[in-house]
């Protein structure tokens, strides 16, 4: 197959908006994937299929709110999943399309209102290429939008400043930009032009803000932990989406300001603090598990059965499994908080696409859409088995649900080798290797963190939409527990 010719045909079909041709090319590429394919071509084909399905999604008017009308965004799901597959291959094997793959994946996630998860995929390279320009413009716009839903004005200022830096860099390099739509936006779009003029005068003092803090006061052990959290974007702090420098190394996220009746207790804030504490504990368990920080004596003299497949019984593996389990507990705690705050009054609560669809579809809230689509990533549904079922699955994350079921209700065996010398007919374990368990746990931690932030933004959005109260609204400070008592 001449991949360049296929790519050209796809570009022509996308530009024409010919749905029949788009479907035809998609079918041909799907058939091609079923044969013997090199990893390089597999990556390219997934990328092309992502682009084709994105065009089909636009033609069929799929959007982030379609779930409220019981409509399945078929092409959007396919688009994201093909870009995900291409990204995975590109990260492992390398690809000429790497920048384009990540930029397109980020844009599609943002179409699902999942802007925070898209941040890392907008690749801002030193060169002014199309993918880098698209990433800079898209990321800048999302940062501006999100800044209005942060509870802390200083955080909002930093989000807008980082957007300004992205727009300014595009403006300063206009002569090198070849993408006509981006060039037109930078030169003529009123919002971007006016923001740049305003920010040129307003943000002089924020240069170098990321370097205001250091980790010098921490012990070596704590410094290692906090650096790991920063690099993996795991602090419950909106600033960790802007930087992995020390200024972001606190779990400062709080339940947003909200109106309650006089003498009502800080119960929403306390509930959020409880689930945030669970999340931070899960994060620390994962850190210790990943770095194999566990005393040997804890696992001695247990007389454990060896299944001869290099089974792992180490305490560090148990810590990763604990982190995995606690993540789902935090998801359900988030749903319980949503159930009360948004007045759903559901008797059975779970963080699932079905529960959100049944209880929050009438809540016109941008970030409820984000939470809905994030919950779909935890759905264990294979696209090929969908039939008439309405879901928007992430096939790559299907194993996460299987691992959870095995941990909670069955037997998860963590082992290096799939082969066995035994008759496997009665082996009822779900088996996974330690590398995949670690990878899935990190994915869960990142999803939980994103869900916490989306919930806070959903609350800010809800409070903004509430009618103004007659009479006074009196601010009541929230008391914080002193760290010395923990």
Image (cartoon, rainbow, N blue to C red):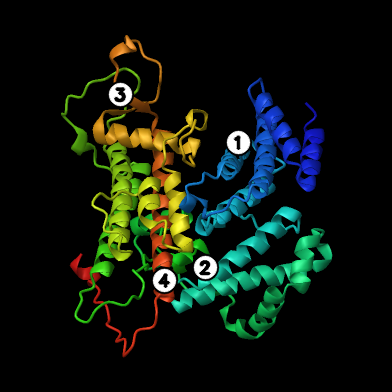
Q: Distance between the residues labelled 4 and 1?
A: 38 Å
Earlier along the polypeptide chain: callout 2 or callout 1?
A: 1
Percent x, y for residue 339? 30, 59
Between residue 354 and residue 302, name the one nearer to us: 354
- Residue count near mark 2 (Cα–Cα under 10 Å), binned few <14, some 14–19, many ≥20: some
How many marks the image carries: the answer is 4
Query: Can you identify the residue that label 1 sits on?
Result: 89
Earlier along the polypeptide chain: callout 3 or callout 4?
A: 3
Observer-side mark, 2 or 1, equals 2
Q: Is residue 98 above or below residue 119?
A: above
Percent x, y for residue 141? 62, 66
Check residue 146 in the rendering and tell me which mark sits there, or answer none. 2
Mark 3 secondary-structure assignment: loop
Q: How far apart are marks 3 and 2 (CA)?
A: 44 Å
Labels 3 and 4 touching (C-beta < 8 A): no
Query: Can you identify the residue that label 4 sits on?
Result: 460
Labels 4 and 2 touching (C-beta < 8 A): no
Between residue 171 and residue 417, name the one nearer to us: 171
């Amino acid at each position: 197959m001449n991949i360049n010719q296929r790519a050209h045909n796809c570009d022509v079909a996308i530009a024409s908006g010919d749905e029949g041709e788009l479907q035809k090319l998609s079918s041909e590429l799907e058939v091609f994937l079923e044969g013997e394919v090199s990893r390089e071509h597999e990556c390219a084909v997934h990328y092309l299929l992502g682009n084709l399905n994105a065009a089909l999604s636009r033609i069929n008017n799929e959007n982030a709110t379609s779930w409220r009308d019981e409509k399945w965004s078929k092409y959007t799901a396919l688009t994201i999943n093909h870009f995900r597959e291409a990204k995975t291959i590109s990260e492992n094997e390398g690809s000429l399309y790497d920048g384009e793959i990540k930029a397109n994946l980020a844009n599609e996630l943002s179409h699902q209102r999942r802007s925070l998860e898209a941040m890392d995929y907008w690749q801002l390279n030193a060169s002014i290429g199309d993918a880098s320009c698209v990433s800079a413009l898209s990321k800048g716009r999302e940062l501006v939008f999100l800044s209005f839903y942060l509870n802390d004005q200083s955080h909002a200022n930093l989000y807008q400043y980082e957007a300004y830096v992205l727009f300014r860099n595009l403006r300063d390099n206009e002569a090198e930009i070849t993408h006509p739509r981006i060039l037109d936006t930078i030169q003529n779009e009123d919002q971007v032009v006016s923001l740049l003029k305003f920010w040129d005068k307003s943000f002089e003092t924020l240069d170098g803000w990321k370097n205001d803090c250091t980790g010098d006061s921490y012990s070596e052990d704590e410094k290692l932990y906090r650096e790991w959290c920063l690099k993996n974007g795991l602090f419950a702090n909106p600033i960790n989406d802007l930087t992995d420098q020390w200024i972001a190394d606190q779990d400062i996220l709080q339940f947003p300001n909200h109106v309650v009746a006089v003498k009502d207790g800080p119960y929403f804030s306390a509930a959020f603090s409880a689930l945030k504490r669970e999340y931070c504990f899960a994060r620390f368990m994962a850190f210790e598990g990943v770095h194999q920080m566990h005393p040997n004596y804890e696992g001695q003299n247990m007389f454990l059965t060896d299944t001869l497949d290099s089974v792992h019984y180490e305490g560090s593996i148990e810590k990763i499994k604990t982190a995995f389990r606690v993540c789902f507990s935090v998801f359900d705690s988030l749903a319980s908080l949503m159930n009360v705050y948004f007045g759903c009054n559901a008797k059975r609560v779970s963080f699932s696409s079905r529960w959100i669809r049944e209880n929050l579809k009438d809540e016109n809230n941008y970030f409820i859409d984000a939470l809905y689509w994030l919950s779909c990533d935890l759905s264990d549904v294979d696209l090929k088995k969908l039939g008439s079922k309405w879901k928007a699955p992430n096939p790559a994350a299907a194993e996460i649900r299987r691992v959870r079921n095995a941990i909670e209700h069955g037997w998860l065996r963590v082992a290096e080798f799939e082969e066995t010398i035994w008759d496997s007919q009665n082996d009822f374990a779900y088996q996974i290797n330690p590398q995949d368990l670690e990878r899935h746990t990190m994915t869960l931690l990142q999803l939980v963190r994103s869900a916490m932030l989306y919930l806070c933004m959903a609350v800010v959005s809800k409070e903004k939409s509430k009618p103004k109260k007659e009479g006074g609204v009196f601010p009541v400070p929230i008391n914080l527990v002193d760290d010395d008592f923990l």
